[in-house]
């Protein structure tokens, strides 16, 4: 199994000026302000992501297409340099497609909205193929809570199927494996494993061109929406047929305070050490190819020392993996 990372916000402070770093420490700049200032620059520097991945003992980088991102504005030369850096460092790449704003409309029953979303996704797929990415991950879109019921819900699923048929075929033509990822409970649709698998069985029953990227941290959000998280929580992974497994997202979640993606080695969420150990056993049994960690931090002191945090988390994960 490869171990990789979507760097989320972990590299952002390296792109601040000294003045901005001082302001961040003082609280004059919030973490959200920092993200708004430098997120696109951090994502654009793929060479740096590859370099950091090598230094913290990772095999893979998932490029984060969350909004904002710079990717559609990258030059051919930038793309060539980034791809070369990944190949030289033996770091494989994948691409996480946008999932907010227009990207969320891949399931829209408004024809024009859905078609524009599909066209946008194809542009990102072209970029990912140029970078040499081996696979893609896409959220199934989101809808307002009042349209996540009854006939509306049926319509949403039907239109997600229409989008997936087109996007999976396009991804395959570009030589990349397509992954559908489960939503958080706050997106109202395609949260549960069975719902995601139902869609994939319609679109890609063989599992050859499309897989299910299970995000256990996303699934844990059900705890804040009136649903239970069974004990032990990692056993939920057993429900996924092996034919749909290739890449998974690994992150934790802290219910009640609703904190996403705390560092795994803190054991602050639902994945304690024993749970993680059992989860890795299931990963091996299910023949998971790539594990993508998605840690994010909001504490300023942690943000200014993310390199150390990433090393410790990677060491913790590899120790448990054996």
Image (tube, helix red, strand yellow):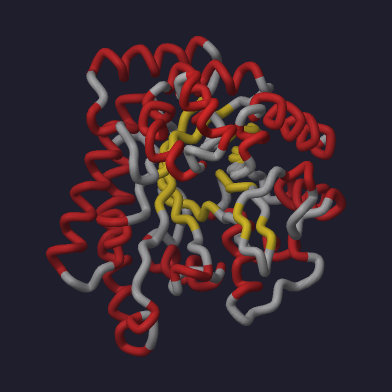
Q: Is residue 209 visible?
A: yes
**Image quadrant occupied by the N terminus:** top right
Residue nearest the viewer, comparing 274 with 1: 274
Residue 181, given in percent of the width and then of the height, sits at: 48, 56
Residue 117, given in percent of the width and then of the height, sits at: 22, 55
Q: Quarter-wise, where is residue 238 in the image?
A: bottom right
Q: Residue at x 48, y 63 (%)?
A: 183
Residue that lies at the very extreme toward the left in this rendered image: 112
Total labels: the figure holds: 0
In the displayed structure, 42 sits above or below 162; it is above
Instruction: Judge from the rendering whether residue 248 lies leftward or rightward of residue 48; answer left or right.
Output: right
Residue that lies at the very extreme toward the bottom in this rendered image: 150
Q: Residue at x 81, y 66 (%)?
A: 232
Q: Residue at x 69, y 65 (%)?
A: 236
Residue nearest the viewer, comparing 277 with 169: 277
Q: Residue at x 33, y 50 (%)?
A: 168
Q: Quarter-wise, where is residue 90 in the image?
A: top right
Residue nearest the viewer, comparing 13 with 98: 13
**Image quadrant occupied by the C terminus:** top right
In the displayed structure, 45 sits above or below 302; it is above
Residue 38, given in percent of the width and then of the height, sits at: 40, 31
In the displayed structure, 155 sits above or below 76; it is below
Residue 218, given in percent of the width and then of the height, sits at: 57, 60
Instruction: Judge from the rendering whether residue 250 lies leftward or rightward of residue 277; answer left or right.
Output: left
Q: Is residue 289 visible?
A: no
Q: Quarter-wise, where is residue 153 in the image?
A: bottom left
């Amino acid at each position: 199994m490869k171990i990789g990372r979507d760097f989320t916000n972990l590299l952002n402070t390296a792109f601040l000026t000294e003045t901005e770093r001082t302001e961040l420490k003082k609280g004059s700049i919030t973490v959200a302000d920092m993200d708004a200032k430098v997120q696109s620059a951090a994502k654009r520097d793929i060479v740096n992501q590859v370099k950091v991945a090598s230094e913290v003992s990772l095999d893979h980088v998932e490029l984060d297409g969350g909004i904002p991102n710079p990717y559609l504005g990258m030059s051919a030369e930038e793309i060539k340099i980034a791809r070369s850096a990944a190949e030289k460092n033996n770091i494989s790449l994948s691409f996480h497609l946008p999932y907010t704003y227009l990207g969320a409309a891949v399931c829209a029953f408004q024809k024009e909205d859905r078609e524009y979303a599909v066209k946008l996704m194809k542009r990102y797929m072209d970029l990912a193929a140029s970078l040499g990415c081996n696979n893609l991950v896409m959220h199934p879109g989101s809808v307002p809570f009042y349209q996540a019921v009854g006939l509306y819900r049926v319509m949403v699923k039907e239109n997600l199927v229409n989008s997936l048929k087109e996007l999976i075929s396009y991804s395959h033509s570009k030589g990349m494996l397509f992954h559908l990822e489960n939503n958080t409970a706050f997106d109202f649709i395609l949260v549960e494993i069975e719902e995601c698998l139902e869609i994939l069985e319609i679109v890609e029953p063989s599992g050859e061109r499309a897989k299910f990227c299970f995000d256990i941290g996303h699934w844990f959000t059900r705890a804040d929406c009136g649903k239970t998280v069974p004990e032990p929580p990692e056993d939920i992974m057993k429900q996924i047929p092996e034919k749909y497994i290739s890449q998974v997202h690994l992150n934790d979640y802290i219910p009640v305070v609703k904190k996403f993606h705390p560092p795994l080695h803190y054991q602050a969420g639902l994945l304690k050490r024993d749970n993680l150990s059992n989860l890795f056993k299931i990963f091996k049994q299910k023949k998971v190819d790539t594990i993508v960690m998605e840690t994010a931090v909001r504490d300023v002191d942690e943000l200014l020392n993310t390199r150390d945090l990433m090393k410790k988390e990677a060491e913790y994960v590899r120790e448990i993996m054996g």
